[in-house]
Structure formats: structure tokens, C-alpha cells
Amino acid sequence: MALALRASTSTSSSAPSSTQRRRRGAATVAVYSQTPRRPVFRALAATATVATPTPGRHPPLALPPTPTSVADAMSRVRAKGKTAFIPYITAGDPDLATTADALRLLDGLGADVIELGMPFSDPSADGAVIQASAARALAAGATTDAVMAMLKEVTPELSCPVVIFSYFNPIVRRGTASFATAAKEAGVKGLIIPDLPYDAIRAFRKEAIKNILELVSVVGVTGARATVNPLVEDLLKEIRQVTNKAVAVGFGISTPEHVSKIAEWGADGVIIGSAMVKQLGEAASAREGLKRLEVYARSLKDALP
């Protein structure tokens, strides 16, 4: 499975320890760097074991291919000269049944990777839209166990990998080994921990083998913005000089024009969070939310090369 970790130099009284924390990142191999007033990037590690059929037996023809690792998914996109479409939604908003339908919908629309937010009461790296989404999910009864159970049923139906975005507190409460095991059994291919304490990196590092990079286009919390940070284009060029890993851009991406521009600048993937979450969570009903999500997601997917 994949793990991601992000770095920040701020500390938080809510962390399990008083050790220096790195604000939003990915847990495993690379550490995000944050430079004042400049975009920051985070690393997303990815590895997965693909099951092979038992000799003499064949999987049901109706099922899609087993989701591969995030790294492999990104490699396929890059090999085709395309830009990966990476939507983010909150688990349990408005309810887990709708989340399951949304995962199937996004996969059917051609998502290359899906980020699924684990609802938490103190989402410090997120803006107002995702904070409200997490609150609705928790009020509706979404728990870590319930999210994992839903994923265990849904992921075998998907052709793209699912990555969980979770704050560190829920992981600590369950136990890091137990959480990682549950995620793997649920078919999860990656884990992003935005507030992972620096001294906890080693506990997750061994879980990852390969890495991709996620470029965060603005310093701050999540949320749709009117324009894309112009520093992204130059920073993409700088990153290309030091790595051949795939680079995806997120934070503040919300319109077809945004994703088209970022693809034009050479990003390997585009991540859309808050604007995607609004389609589901702020609709009058779950059915309407899914319809809104389909129209919106399709408009962004169609804007990508």
C-alpha cells in the first residue's frame, strides 16, 4: 500500500506528542518542504501487491481489473502523454452509501486516482468547505470502521486506486499497525497524513517503496480559488530538474480552465478537492448531489489532455 507524508514547521497542541510537526503531508518516504510565500509540494508514496488468480481458476468477467498502485496508475497516464484526473471527496458526506456510489461514479468517469477524506473533528489543513463536509459526515455517523467496511465492498469494483486522506489522531487512536492493516484489507492503495509528526515518519516509511510528488499550488488550507498561483509553472520546472517522479498539482483547483492551464504547464496530475466536495455535500439530496458531481467531474475530466 502507499503512504504519504507532508511537512510543516508548525506545532499543534492537539498532536499526540509535543514534538515538532510538519503540517499537511504524506507519510512514508519523502518529506514535503514548505517555503514561505511559495507553493509547497508533498510526496505521495505508493506500492501495492496485485493479486494473481489461483491456477485453474478465473476471476468473474464482470469485475474490472484489480486496482494497481498509485505509482503504476500515474506511470500509465504519463506513458500515454496525458494528465491524471485525481478527485477528492469526503467519506460519509452525506452518507456512506452515497460515498460508495460516488466512488463508482468517479471511477466510471475515468478518475486515475481517488483521494478519500476520512472525516475528523479538527481538520486543520482544510478550509471551510471540507471542514463542513467532515462535520456532516461525523454527524451522520461515519466512523473509521464504517468507512473501511464500505471500502472493502467497493474497491474490488474499481479500476483506479483509492488513497485515504486521514489526520494523525484517528490513526493513533486505533493504532498505526492496526490502521494500516485495516486500510490494506479494505483495498486502499495509499495514505496521506497531513499532520504527521516528524518523529513518527519512521513508523510509516517502511510501508512504501515508490514515490510520486504532489505539488500544492498555494501555502495555506484547502479551498477553491479564482486563479491558479502563477508560481506553479516555475516551480514545476524546478522540480523537473531534480526528479523524474510524477508531479500532481492540488489546492485551489476548481475550474476546467484551471486544470487545462496546469496540464499545459506540464503537471502529471491535477487534484480537485473542495470544489468536488461541494457538489455532493451541498446538494438538496443525495441523488441531486451525484448528478451534480457527474456533471462537474466530467467537465474537468474533459478539460484534460
Image (cartoon, rainbow, N blue to C red):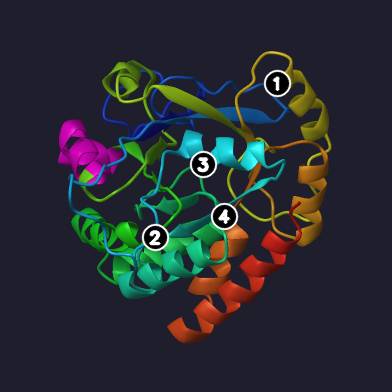
Q: Earlier in the sequence, mark 3 or mark 1?
A: 3
Q: Which element is circle 2 on?
A: loop
Q: Are the residues at dot 1 and dot 2 in contact (C-beta closer than 8 Å)?
A: no
Q: Which secondary structure class fits the magenta region best?
A: helix
Q: Amino acid type of disc 3? A: Ala
Measured Cα–Cα span from mark 4 to mark 1 = 23 Å
Which numbered mark, 2 or 4, is in the foreground of this view? 2
Q: Which mark is residue 64?
A: 2
Q: Mark 4 touching mark 3, by CB under 8 A?
A: no
* Foreground disc of the pair 4, 1: 1
In the image, residue 246 above or below residue 182:
above
Give the x, y percent position of residue 248.
63, 38
Measuring from the top left, give residue 111's x and y in whole percent.
55, 56
Label 2, label 3: how many angstroms apart (C-alpha)?
A: 15 Å
The circle on residue 239 is 1
Q: Nearer the viewer, mark 2 or mark 3?
A: 2
Dot 1 amino acid type: Ile
Q: Which residues are magenta?
A: 169-184
Question: Where does the image place residue 136, in percent across and percent down from the top left?
Answer: 39, 68
